[in-house]
Amino acid sequence: MAKLPFCVGLTGGIGSGKSEVTRVFARLGAQIVDTDAIAHQLTGPDGAAMAAIVSVFGAEMATCTGALDRAAMRNRVFSNPELRKALEDILHPLIRAESVRRIDAVNSSYALLVVPLLAENQAAYRPLIDRILVVDCDETQQIERTAARPGLNVEQASAILASQASRASRLAIADDLIDNRGDLPRLNEQVERLHVLYLKLAAKGSAQI
């Protein structure tokens, strides 16, 4: 495989602020490859993953439009590690393959590959990434922000957080860190500084300066 463009892997726990950070990077000109968005396309109406999902989990996991019934699947696999792995075994190879294709097509100075569960899936994604950027905040903030989303409460937010890699595990893999415990201007300032760094690194073709 030919060398891919310079790529920064963005990760962070649920409610850490990855979406806002991604929006700022995109506004500055970085090209975004979002694995969550890819997953949604693969599991959309007649998406590329749906035939395998229906084969393994049954037709009741598809809506009348041919898309994944996300609520039903979440209830089915969340507390069942074996079923969750079965779903991941279907989705992850497809998501990674599409991620590679999109990174290869990048025409900006660098790509920002958004992988929420990067700490859990380093073996698959680390070879694609030159640097890892972690968005971080206090766990109490993560729970509060997640519980504020439609259809979620504090108990559910806490359960999701507990199912992910620990904050310490994410910090341990970080080359760069965004502290999202403060306000939006502070967040923008950090992203802008890192954008300048990534432009320099991409121009050098190196992950180090």
Image: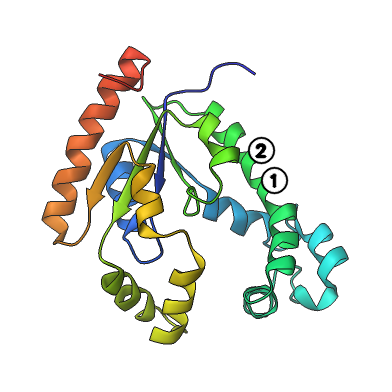
Q: What numbered label is drawn on residue 97?
A: 2
* The one of 142 and 171 positioned closer to us in this rendering: 171
Q: Does 102 sit left or right of 18 as displayed?
A: right
| Camera-side residue of 145 and 167 | 167
C-alpha span from label 2 to label 1: 5 Å
Determine which residue is flagged by label 1. 94
Q: Position of residue 70 (x, y in %)?
A: 64, 73
Q: Secondary structure at mark 2?
A: helix
- Residue at 54% x, 54% y: name it: 37
Q: Residue furthest top?
A: 204
Q: Is residue 62 above or below residue 95?
A: below
**In the rendered structure, are the residues bearing label 2 and label 1 in contact, judged by CB atoms less than 8 Å apart?**
yes
Q: Secondary structure at mark 1?
A: helix
User: Which color scheme does this rendered protein use?
Assistant: rainbow
Instruction: Kindly identify the residue that appears in the image at 28 percent across and 74 percent down.
Output: 140
- In the rendered structure, which amino acid carries the disc numbered 1? Leu
